[in-house]
Structure formats: C-alpha cells, structure tokens
Image (spheres, grey):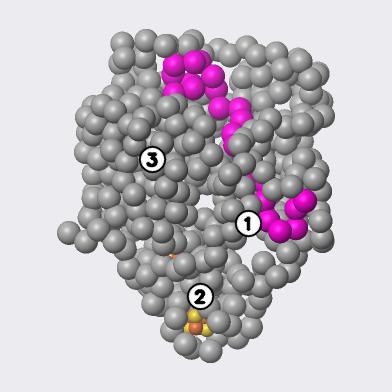
C-alpha cells in the first residue's frame, strides 16, 4: 500500500503573507452584492425573488433547476437588479443584485438543531441541501448530492485541510480559530454516512494547525500530517496518502470507498445543521505582493473583487495579474467588478516578479519535465500537442479528461507553456464533441 503519490512539485509557498493574521470582518461592508446564479457545478439556479423585493440575510433568493444548490442573500436590503453581470471566469452570468441596507437582518428558513444527534441521515441531508452547501475547496459540487450518492458505498470519510495551494491560508486560519466547528461538522458527516472513523489531512507546513486539530479531535476523528508537496490537497492524491487506495482513471473517490470534504465545507455543515445558518459567507485570503495589506477576511458572497482589494489597502504596485484562487489552479480575473462566489477562497494580486515564478509562454523544448511531475501519470506534453492541433479524439485517448488541473506541469515547465489553460479548453471541446455525437446518434436511431 503506497501512502504517497507520484509526481508533484514544490512551489514557493508565500503563506507567510497571511498565515499569522487572524480573520477580520470587513472594515466596510459592500454597498451592493451581486449573487451569481452559477456558484456551483451543475445547472445555474433560477431567481425566486423579484426586483424591488426586500430580503434578509439567509433568505433563499434562488433555487436549483437541476444539479445544484439554492443561493441565499448574503446581506439584507433590496433586490435592485436581476440581470447578467461579469463573472470571475470571464463573460457574464445571470445574477441577483442586492443593495445593502447595512442592517444585517438575519432570517433563515432553517431550524437550528443543537441536538443534531437525534436527526436521521435523510433529515441532515435535507438541511445541507436547503442551506445551499457546495464544496468550498473550489470544486463547488453540491454537498448533499455527494453525501446521498455515497451512502452505502463509502467506508472512509476524509476532510481535506491540506490547503496545498501557495499563498492561501483561509483553511489554516479556520482550523486555528474555529477548529471545533470543523470537528463537529465532521461528526455530523460521519453520522450521516453511518461511519465511526474519519481523517483530517493537513500538510506538515502547518504544525500549529495540526497541534490544534489533534487537541480538538475526538470520537473517531484522526488528524493525519501529510508531507508538503503540491498537489497534496487534490482529492485523489489525498485519498492515496491517507488510505493507500488509488482512484482509477476516470473514477471518483466513491469508487474506492472514499468521500472527501473540504474543511470549510465541514464547518458549513455544522453551521447549517446545529445553528440553522445557510451558507452566505466564507473566509477569503486577500494576498500577493501587489497588495498593501494582505489579510484573511470574512466575506459575504457577491462582494466585488475591487471592494476586497480596497479592503486590503489597495495596490502597492500595479499587479501583473489578479487571480481568484491560488497561483496553481486560480483563474485570472479580467474585470474587478466581478463578485465572489461560494468556491472563492482567495484573491491573489501578483507582482510581475511573483508571476514570473509561474507563467510566461514560449515554445515547448521537449524536456519531459511535465511528465515527471504529473500526479495523474499523464503526458502533458503530448496532450498539449494534440490540443494545439485540435485533435480531440487523440487528446482524449491520452486520458486528458483525467487531468485534475493541478498546474504542476505548468509550474515546472521551463518554457512556461500554458498547459492547464490548454487542457481546460480541450476538456470543453471534448465534452461538446461528445454531446454532439450523442445527439447525432439519437437522431439517426430515430430515423432507423
Ligand atoms: S496534466 Fe493535469 S494533472 Fe497532470 S500535472 Fe498537468 S495539470 Fe496536473
Ligand atoms: S515541461 Fe514544458 S517544455 Fe518540457 S516537455 Fe513539458 S511542455 Fe514541453
């Protein structure tokens, strides 16, 4: 049983900018929040409020239309627009815009259950669903779906507190400041799955968090210190580190009996079930050398990125790039009026020198280093060649769809070939092609 994963890299961590800074509330609340209808994996939500409606913090303002989770108001005030607004990933998404009345009036439809031990698994899943909880590590998969599809198949529960992305420290601070809520959330998840054991994986570059969580851990919860190596916090790599099980190509954690939840997600589960609070805010790391005052702040969803940059004292120099997330897996922001969503754990404003550690494109020199570091045993160099030539079937045959977009290949590439960017685009093209082929096959079948 191999308790480590193949490949990986050691990017500079830069966590010292914020890891010792306690989480702060915003000095100034945003005058407006813009809540995207697409905060999760799946279909966008549909608004259930109208322009002119008064809303309270925690009130449901949008309902799922397929795979998804409801969205709740993150400030109290008046709905002033329902229209497409800039999104972090580029383009525009339908959004509900709320003008803040700065009263923070809270009214949730969820009932607090401080006695949650008495709840049945179905009741807990329903609360998690109604609270709008989605994976907070960035993936954004609806948590209630992960639980209900895993019950009976999962024998090992893992909480991902590795936080292996450079610069980001929001989960680190959560463990130090509110670790007990993570443990309680884990216990609620264990009860729901009917398990008596769970693991919390933390990279060993956070010894204070390991010590704190070990002191708090009880009732079958074990803290595992993982060697610091990127992407230790990727789901499949963490499963291998903790259980020795390897998720097969194209497989999901449940295929090897595992379910993985982010530490912030576990804390959100506690908030929802025990305290009746829907998911409306989270800790976000505002960081990077281009900011005057890097820090960790508690941010209502829908806050404009420009507002958060002001909150961190503004720019000390013109940033080379602004990303949501970390430097390895983050997404470039082209419009600072774009607003935060549930999966945003960091805003990174990189100086030119910092950015040079990560990207600047040139041509591939066929060195093969990307192959050596890929934790998924892929061949990024060939996947990229096929992608460049738009040879989607060949790229898929190289298992491109198994790429976890960890960015290790990008990081190590001496020619700074934008590999991950090309794989994201290729995945979109491969999925589109598959849908087109399926539709054509169905049409032919109808004719026959
Ligand atoms: S090909 Fe994908 S999984 Fe492999 S190193 Fe690159 S980004 Fe990571
Ligand atoms: S690391 Fe970069 S330059 Fe080297 S083979 Fe891979 S893509 Fe080409």
The quadrant the N terminus occupies is: bottom left
Q: Residue at x 48, y 61 (%)?
A: 406
- Is ligand 1 closer than 8 angstroms to the Cβ of mark 1? no
Q: Residue at x 75, y 44 (%)?
A: 312
Q: Which mark is residue 244?
A: none
Q: Does residue 442 appear in this view?
A: no
Which residue is label 1 attached to? 331
Mark 2 / mark 3, whichever is N-terminal: 3
Q: Is residue 312 left or right of residue 61?
A: right
For label 1, the SS is strand
For label 3, the SS is helix
* Residue 95 horizontal/vertical position (percent): 71, 35
Name the residue nearer the viewer: 442 or 185.
185
Mark pair 3, 1: CA separation? 32 Å
Which residue is label 3 attached to? 211
Task: Please identify the residue farthest to the left as the structure is shown.
Answer: 1
3 or 1: mark nearer the eye: 3
Name the residue nearer the viewer: 71 or 14.
14
């Amino acid at each position: 049983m191999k308790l480590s994963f193949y490949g990986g890299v050691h990017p500079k961590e830069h966590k010292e900018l914020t890891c010792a800074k306690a989480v702060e509330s915003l000095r100034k609340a945003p005058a407006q929040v813009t809540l995207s209808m697409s905060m999760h994996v799946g279909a966008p939500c549909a608004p259930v409020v109208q322009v002119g409606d008064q809303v309270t913090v925690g009130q449901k303002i949008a309902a799922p239309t397929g795979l998804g989770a409801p969205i709740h108001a993150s400030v109290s005030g008046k709905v002033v627009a329902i229209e497409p607004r800039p999104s972090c990933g580029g383009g525009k998404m339908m959004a509900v815009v709320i003008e803040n009345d700065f009263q923070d009036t809270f009214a949730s439809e969820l009932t607090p259950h401080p006695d949650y031990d008495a709840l049945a698994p179905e009741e807990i899943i329903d609360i998690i669903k109604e609270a709008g909880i989605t994976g907070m590590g960035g993936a954004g998969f609806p948590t209630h779906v992960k639980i209900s599809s895993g019950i009976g198949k999962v024998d090992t529960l893992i909480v991902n507190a590795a936080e292996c992305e450079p610069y980001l420290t929001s989960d680190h601070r959560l463990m130090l400041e509110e670790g007990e809520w993570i443990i309680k959330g884990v216990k609620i998840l264990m009860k729901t799955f009917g398990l008596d054991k769970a693991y919390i994986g933390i990279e060993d570059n956070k010894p204070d968090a390991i010590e704190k969580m070990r002191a708090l851990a009880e009732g079958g919860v074990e803290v595992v210190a993982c060697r610091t190596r990127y992407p230790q916090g990727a789901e499949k790599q963490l499963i291998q580190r903790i259980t020795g099980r390897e998720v097969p190509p194209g497989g999901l954690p449940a295929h090897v009996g595992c379910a993985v939840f982010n530490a912030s997600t576990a804390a959100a589960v506690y908030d929802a079930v025990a305290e009746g609070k829907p998911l409306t805010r989270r800790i976000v790391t505002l960081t990077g050398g281009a900011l005057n005052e890097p820090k960790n702040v508690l941010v209502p969803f829908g806050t404009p990125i420009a507002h958060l940059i002001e909150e961190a004292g503004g720019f000390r120099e013109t940033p080379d790039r602004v990303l949501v997330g970390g430097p390895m897996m983050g997404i470039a922001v082209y419009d600072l009026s774009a607003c935060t969503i549930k999966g945003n754990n960091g805003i990174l404003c990189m100086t030119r020198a910092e950015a040079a550690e990560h990207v600047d494109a040139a041509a591939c020199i066929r060195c093969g280093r990307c192959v050596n570091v890929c934790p998924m045993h892929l061949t990024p160099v060939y996947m990229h060649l096929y992608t460049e030539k738009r040879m989607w079937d060949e790229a898929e045959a190289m298992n491109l769809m198994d790429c976890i977009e960890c960015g290790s290949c990008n990081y190590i590439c001496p020619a700074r070939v934008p590999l991950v960017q090309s794989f994201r685009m290729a995945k979109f093209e491969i999925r589109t092609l598959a849908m087109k082929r399926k539709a054509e096959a169905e049409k032919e079948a109808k004719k026959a």
